[in-house]
Image: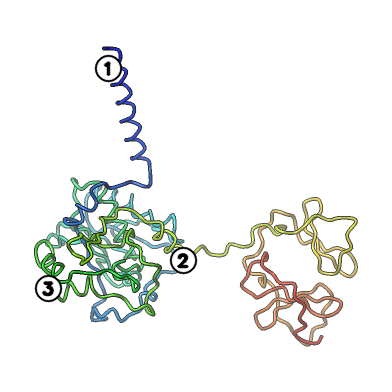
Amino acid sequence: MKKLNLTKLVLVTMLSVLLFNCERDSEDIIETNQFADAKNAHVCIEKWDTSENNSKAASVKAKEWEAGQTIRVKFLNGNNFVQSKVRQYAVAWESYANIKFEWVSSNSSANIKIGFKEGQFANDGGSWSYLGTDSNSHAHSMHFGWFNDNTTDTEFRRTTIHEFGHALGLIHEHQNPVAGINWDREAVYAYYAGPPNNWSRAQVDNNLFRRYDANISNHSVYDPKSIMHYPIPAEHTTDGVAVGSNTQLSATDKSFIATIYPETNTGGGDICDGVAAYNGNTSYSVGDKVTYQGTLYQRTSSGWNNLGACGTPAPSDICDGVAAYNRNTSYSVGDKVTYQGTLYQRTSSGWNNLGACGTSAAAKSNTVFPPVNN
């Protein structure tokens, strides 16, 4: 019996360790008490430039950074621990958005400037961020008012990712133009009138009930799991629908931010991509391409033109290095020109349309369309 009990104890201990490790290492951390926590969760407000009169008339689209941009970030105060936690969780966006955060010293120039509740900001217990590129215009553009040495990792993660979402230009998800939340307005007014918010009815209207116009904001389908959503207790809706205290990026957050900051075109990869190997039994026409012993060739009227070794990156723009058509120039078969935003190649019978400028080498057209007479 003692051996059996000992065996059961060992199994229970091993299972507990396994579950702990799975939870610690998994991206999909489940917050079992998130709906209960929704009643007590801290919420942030969106900061807008005062010149906009807080009207939200300015287009959120205009506040986005450039895709591929390096955004410089610095801390105005705060100890090493809270700073390290912000750095740890802010970079979650970098895995899905084509942007990069560069952390610079406090005396360096920066786009995003972060403060904590101490020193000159000792009276600011809220958390907030200016939207997107508005951060450039403010000496103090982001604030974490409830972070300290006792803050849990869950709260560090939730609030940091949320505020950096604002810094990338994202609005609160419950203000999504297609959100259909059935608010119990009087219950919400009463709740936010109390501490720690002490909001007026106008502030509640501004931060919860007002929705953005579809024509001034980028938006996806409504996502109640978004990191940008306020937690909503069931008591705040007329149908009892609740939204938990979301603490990580949702699947829609990840896909949506990738559309706002897409990967830039780095070229078509290999110049030989999609080109078949030379076949001695095939009859080739002028302009046809083949690979042969690791090299790309193109058929001309007199033989084969060596275009380079396979493995060479294809140009990001098929028109790169190609001169515009000049009617005073005599062109030979195989010559390329650009004309009205399109790349053409001379053939024995006219001009071959290779595709619009701005596309990669892998996405060309073979439609014959002679734009001009030679």
Q: Is residue 143 above or below residue 318?
A: above
**What is the quadrant of residue 185 in the picture?**
bottom left
**What is the quadrant of residue 200 in the picture?**
bottom left
For marks 2 and 3 on the same chain, the one whose residue lies earlier in the sequence: 3
Say what secondary structure mark 1 lies in: helix
Look at mark 1 in the image and give the residue it sits on.
5
Q: CA distance from mark 3 to mark 1?
A: 61 Å
Image spot of residue 63 (x, y percent)? 37, 73
Residue reaching furthest to the front:
239
Most foreground residue, 52 or 117: 52
Hey, what amino acid is under mark 2? Thr
Say what secondary structure mark 3 lies in: loop
Look at mark 3 in the image and give the residue it sits on.
200
Q: Is residue 299 above or below residue 89?
A: below
Most foreground residue, 325 or 268: 268
Image spot of residue 295 (x, y percent)? 78, 55
Look at mark 2 in the image and give the residue it sits on.
259
Side of 97 relative to 228 (left or right): right
For marks 3 and 1 on the same chain, the one whose residue lies earlier in the sequence: 1
Image spot of residue 372 (x, y percent)? 77, 86
